[in-house]
Amino acid sequence: MFQLHRSSRRNLDYCSDLWKLAWAACLAVVCLLVVGCGRSVDLASQEEIERIKAERRKNAAEEGMAYKDSIAEKRKAQAEAKAEIERKRQLILSQKKKNVFPKQNKRIKRPRDFKDWKKRDYYLAKAEADPRLVEAVEYLGNQFAGDEHAAVLLAELLLPGLPRGMEDVKVKALRGSRNTLTETLVGALLKNRTESALNTLKTVILHPQPGDGVAVAQKVLQCLARNPCKQTEPIILEALLHPTEPVDKGTGHPNSRRQIRNAKDTQQLVRVAQAAMASGVSEEFREELAKRITEPGLPLEYRRVYSDLLMEPWPQNISAQMVLFEDSNATKKQQARLQKQWAEYSSGALARLHGLEPAFQGRHPNTDVSQSNYSRAGGTRPDQAGKAAAADAKFLERVVMKLWSKSVTAAADDRLYRATSLDEAANTILLSATMPRDSVRKSLYDVLTRNWQDGPKALAEVGLFDGIICEPGFWPVLKSAHFASDKLADNKRSTSKNPRLVKNEPIRRQAQPDPWQARIVELLLANCTHMEKAANAHRKLANRKDSGVSKKLSANDFPVKLHDNPRLVAEYRLEWPSGIKNTKSELLPDGTKLWYAKFSQTAVFEVVVSQYYGGLKSSHRHLGPKGCWLESLNPVDGTGKIRSIDVVIQRTPSTVQVSTGAGERLLIDILAVEIENPSKSTR
């Protein structure tokens, strides 16, 4: 069993060896086959690749030739299409009318001389933004005034764009001189003086074309405002009251939307109005504007803006201000402001009558305008208005004819008649004190006498004692009211039923001095200063050749006896209306006379005072540490007039402490005024 098993095992080992040899042989055969097959496959793929590359090169060459052929065909087709387009364009251009100009790719050289320019040259110069167009327009305006065809050409140049038939021509902006061109075109249209020219300006401003038309309308309106004239003032007025309405493209009618609704356009109109006022539009324009803004239905925005401008202190605004003053919507503050302005102008007119230049200090408040947004856009300051008034050649005539007219004085009389206190009538008194009319003097006397107990505080606050030049008759009117109030107070004390009160009354009055006394002295000294300046101006005028004014100073025929050995320094005399030339004498009161003299003297103070005190009838003496004031107010026998005489004797500062009875340097001012008695005259 064991042996059988060992033989079996040997057989099995022998079989496994045989199998191993068989597998090795098979593996060798397989390797040989693989190697041989690999070589054959590699050789076959390389040949195929070369063949494919050759085919590709061939195909690429064929495709390149085809592409070149297609490009050539494409270029040929484009050239044929371009030639066809050019042929059609030339055909269209050849069929156009002769007066229609083709688009210019290059700038055409225009004639150097403007007289050789045609319409085409003007249009193309506008399209090309040629700077010479400004000079050409000036030539057109100067040489063709009154020509309707020139007016049409100027209108087409003013409107935005180009005329019909030239829509395809691009218009370049005229850099740096567009405003100049617009101003030149407007000036040329005004020089043309034809109805077509004015209608063009009116249409451009009131009914501008949409788009650039609004900007052109604003520029044209500004040009007219800077150079107003009688023909263009109605256009400016309509533009201020009725804002521009662009024309609708579809209907040709103005749009319903108003341009004034936004703040920018409002500021634009304000600048136009300010430019017109500063450029000197007529008084009729200003007065008409004031009437239109006071009419019902006008927006409050307009009323506020334009009323502020018209209330600015320009003498040319007086007529318009009178309309605003009488308006029912005017506030008391506005009326007070206007009366202060008028008082200053009236004072300036008095200065002119005395031979002086009006000195405007801008005392009137201007807060309403200066604090508004509209004034900051370029409003007028009071000092500018003062300079303008001083340089105004017609200032005196304007003030005399307007402020001193019967209508204004009647209104002042009525206000003074109805006043119940000096505080209520302060501004009216300030104005009335500068109006030389007998009826106003009577009204002033009445209101001062009735309300004398109110004191001078209200009058001082409005500036009555601050150097304003009052008319000559106001001084005796003030003194008459003072004397009348003192007499009335004395009568009340004399009829008192309390003897002890009557006995102690003078002591009480001395303890509480009259508040009017210091103010009256201030006004007297201010009057003397003004008259001294008038005397100096009169003397300078006398030194001119052929002036017709006497150079000789004389104190003869003075209404008061003078002191011994008077040394005259200045003398001034005034008589209305015979002594006034170049003005409306019927507006000045008859019989007003004024005498003024100034002396510089070395004399004994007490002696000079006693001489004048004895020579003045019913005089009152007021002594002070630096001098003495003597005053008298008496009727002129048989004339119905009163005469006020005031003598002011002042010690010079270097001789104030001189002992009594010694000679010292004295300055003596004498002022005498004669007018109709205000207490006797009728209103």
Image (cartoon, rainbow, N blue to C red):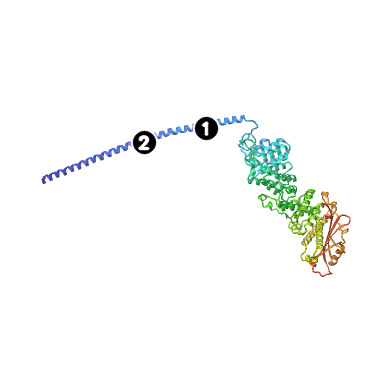
What secondary structure is marked by label 2?
A: helix
Point out residue 655 in the picture as x, y percentages from the top left corner: 80, 67
Q: On screen, 454 above or below 263?
A: below
Mark 2 or mark 1: which comes first in sequence?
2
In the displayed structure, does residue 108 sit left or right of residue 49? right
For this orientation, the residue located farthest to the front is 497
Residue 528 position by quadrant = bottom right
In the displayed structure, does residue 292 sit left or right of residue 560? left
| Disc nearest the viewer among 2 and 1 | 1
* Residue 543: mark: none
Separation of disc 2 and disc 1 at Cα?
42 Å
Residue 423 position by quadrant = bottom right
As rendered, which of 555 and 618 lies closer to the eye? 618
What secondary structure is marked by label 1?
A: helix
Badge 2 is on which residue? 50
- The kind of residue tagged 1 is Gln
Badge 2: residue crowd in 10 Å (few <14, some 14–19, many ≥20)? few
Point out residue 187 in the picture as x, y percentages from the top left corner: 71, 41
Q: On screen, 604 above or below 320?
A: below
Point out residue 496 in the picture as x, y percentages from the top left corner: 80, 63
As rendered, which of 106 and 57 lies closer to the eye? 106
Q: In which quadrant is the N terminus drawn?
A: top left
Point out residue 428 in the picture as x, y percentages from the top left corner: 76, 53
Badge 1 is on which residue? 78
